[in-house]
Amino acid sequence: MLSAAVIVYILSFDSMVLLTRVPGFLESIMQRLVRYGPAARHAWLLPVGLAVALLPVATLGAEVRPWTVLESSAEHLILRMNPAGPLRLEPGSEAGAPQVGVDGFGWTREVGAPRLPRLSLRVALPPDSRPTLTLRSYQVVPVPGVRPAPVPTLDTLSLPADGSPLVEGLHFRRVLRESPEIYGGEALYPPVPVRLGRRGALRRQQFVELIYTPLAYDPASGSLLRYQQVVVEIDFGVPQDGERHAVLVPGPGWGPIYRAAFVNPRPLEQRPRGLAPLGVESASQEAAGSTAVLKIHVDADALVRIPCSSLTDLSGTDPANWSLTNRGVEQPILVQAGAGDPACDFVEFWGVARREENMVLEVDPAPAPPLYRDSDVGGTNVYLLSVGAGPGTRVATLAADPHPTTPLPAEADFIHTERFEEETLFVPLAGDDSWYWSPSFSSLTTDTRVLSLDLPGLSGASFSAGVRVSLRGMTSFASVPDDHDVSFLLNGQVLPGILFDGETVGILDTTVAQDTVLTDPSSLSMTAEQVLDGVNPVSNEVVPDYVEVTYRREFVAVDGSLLFSFPDGDHGFAVRGITDTDARVYDLSASVGGSSVAAPVLLTGAVVSGSPGCGGPDACTVSFEIHPSGVGTRRLLVTSAGVTAAPTLVELDVPSQLMDPSNGAGYLVITHRDLVDRTPGSSFEQFLAHRAAGGLPVVVAYVDDIYDEFGDSLPGPEAIRNFLSYAFHNWTGWDADGDSNPDPPSYVLFLGDATFDARQRFTYDGSIEPWFNKTPTTIFYQAGSVFLSWFSSDVWPVAVAGEDLFPDYLVGRLTSRSMAETEIVLAKTLAYETAPPAGNWISDALLVSGKGKRTEETEEFENIILN
């Protein structure tokens, strides 16, 4: 029997919180979170940092409920809804509009609408149901003289660049502004006291959200109505031949949570059914007949060259059978013939860095602000070099030599866009970038920022050059439309200014005369102009995102290489500045099957001319021609062979067994090899044995194996989520209750620290700390949230059943940064569980918090839990 004692860690990037070993403490937290917690649209918050995987959940305590089950069957459910406590009226604004609350309820979240008590519950459903709700009866009691305050919006006064906590009055303020459509309309808000919300699943048990609002605002009377004794019927709408029993996926620790999660837990007592396996794309990229697979790490766009002499793991194989894949797609490569073992000189291919950087929409729980997930998992791309049973795909060649008697005239220049961007400030923005170019500038402090823009190869041609500047607003004032006003000077010439509003992106998109305005370098000056709220100045603070200048550029290489685009057709080129007579010309216009993987073509016959050894101010010139190919724009690379890039890492892929469906576990540990001591007798090994002795078979899954099998060897939380989904739906090796039905794992422990800075931007010298992001987490962002803004969450990887973001594993994290830290933490954990010292601490809890991002977090967090 596993101990009911609890150790809870709260994960943040600033601190780790330890709650003492209190029997029943975690159980009460989980009961409150699951019973009254966010359903399909808010469940991503449930255990933001609660390490519930450390120990199983025991019996949940009783709690006063604002509902009574009148009738429950496999076809329908009848409930009577009534708040258990009285109304609370608290001051809400200078005008005296009260904040209305009910104990145990959260609040509505539509900005400008009345802020009223709201509770989100869950109704368990049979798998084939189509639920409908009928409001059978209710009582209405007027609450005269109470005009509720609206849901506030936030004015952002400033955002500290050092990540320090935000303080109300200094960094933000709440603004109460009534929606005229609601407060001045005729319809009740909300129109009904109970309605159905989104559908979801808890470990394959389907449910529908039941949203209960016991109060309504009546604009006709300007006061509240209270609904009492509300009786509702939910008809499950199961077809005549449909399955009428709930689908229960059991496992240790889940029974009490199931009973606490739903208003109708009785159907959960039905016999469980087996799970239908779900396929997962990708997995191992080893080719048929492969003897070894090498993982090649690339951090920047470059022509990559690897000496065959360094590929000793492929010794004894035929280089003709080597193939390269990226994200499951084979990419053409060049294998230069040579002697030795392997029998080749070098392998060459066009490598690109990963590009996922923006905040992507995860869920839109309207009218609440949408939730965004940071897709940035670092710039490292991974290519897999393997040995197949037959020949691999090779780079095609195409003649590009100048005509011997009538060569095409060399083009003078080409249209080029130079982008300037530095990612040094983390202030995420919904649907846009997460990183910006500090420092910011403000009308009340430093009002001007000047950037120096290098424009290599700037030609003297007459051309309408494009200038594009992207700025992020760092302040926001609801009472001031267009609260950002920015003016620009480029080399002394006035550019059009821009106006934009709030924490959004403002874009300057204009043109200038290249021959009279642009220089190399050019100077761009940006000034935050004064903005008034009535007669009072307010802070107009902005920060650059990027600057782009589109101009005509001469064909001159920089550092021995030039990558350019040109319209398809008959054209001659002469590229100066090449530093090696062994020059390469590649056409990078095509991709493999419409994927993001390049299908380069080697252009042959280019003529290299210049001084011996390519010395002198212009080095060598490479001349070549292209002819129509059927693509609209050609993308061409001219480079000196001596400046090809080496990969950042080449390592052997050791296959794992994680995709074997016969695997089984009750407890999963996801970690990095560097963080755990597998020596017999270590604290880690004792911890695993302790869990197994308690009835939970343990599987340790290393992140590199997870990346290889479930993410095309690319690191990040998405591969971890793919693995957890596969294990949940496909593993069959564990039968927890002896009923001959396979059970998915119940617990996940993430072991290792993580960071929001996946690209190590804050380490300016390029070094990487030994602990750096070894067990990554997921970063979310929600605009307009005082408590949240951006936050880390381990819930997204474990939400693997249904379309919701409700966690389907009991999940936790130990934020150790080294093997030594892991040993210390687990030794303490074992001591607490097996031989706790006597004292009052066993029944008392201590919560120690790191710095928060905003003040008044208690109210906001309670609203999240209850709503």
Image (tube, rainbow, N blue to C red):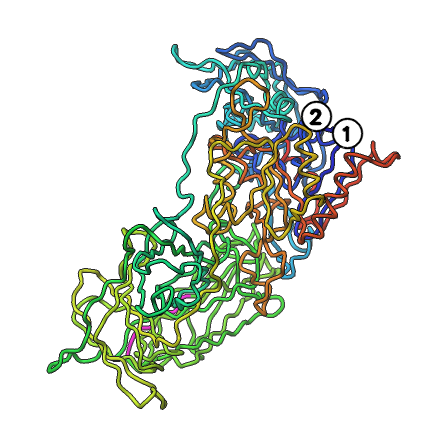
For the N terminus, the quadrant is top right
Amino acid residing under circle 2: Ala
Horizontal side of 342 relative to 599 (left or right) equals right
Q: Nearer the viewer, residue 470 or 240?
A: 240
Which residue lies at the image location 53% right of the left edge and 65% below the top edge? Answer: 437
The image shows residue 108 at horizontal and vertical percentages of 58, 33
Name the N-terminal-most of marks 1 and 2. Answer: 1
Which quadrant holds residue 3?
A: top right
- Element type at marker 1? loop
Badge 2 element: loop
On the picture, is 770 further left or further right than 571? right
Mark 2 sits on what residue? 58
Number of residues whose C-alpha sits closer than 10 Å to that of mark 2, classed few (under 14), some (14–19) or many (20 or more): many
Label 1, label 2: how many angstroms apart (C-alpha)? 9 Å
Image height of 292 relative to 834, above or below:
below
Asked which quadrant contains residue 580, the reply is bottom left
Q: Examine the residues drawn in magenta and state their main secondary structure.
A: strand
Which mark is drawn over residue 340?
none
In the displayed structure, 611 sits above or below 451; it is: below
Q: Which residue was labeled with disc 1? A: 23
- Residue 391 x, y percent position in the rendering: 27, 55
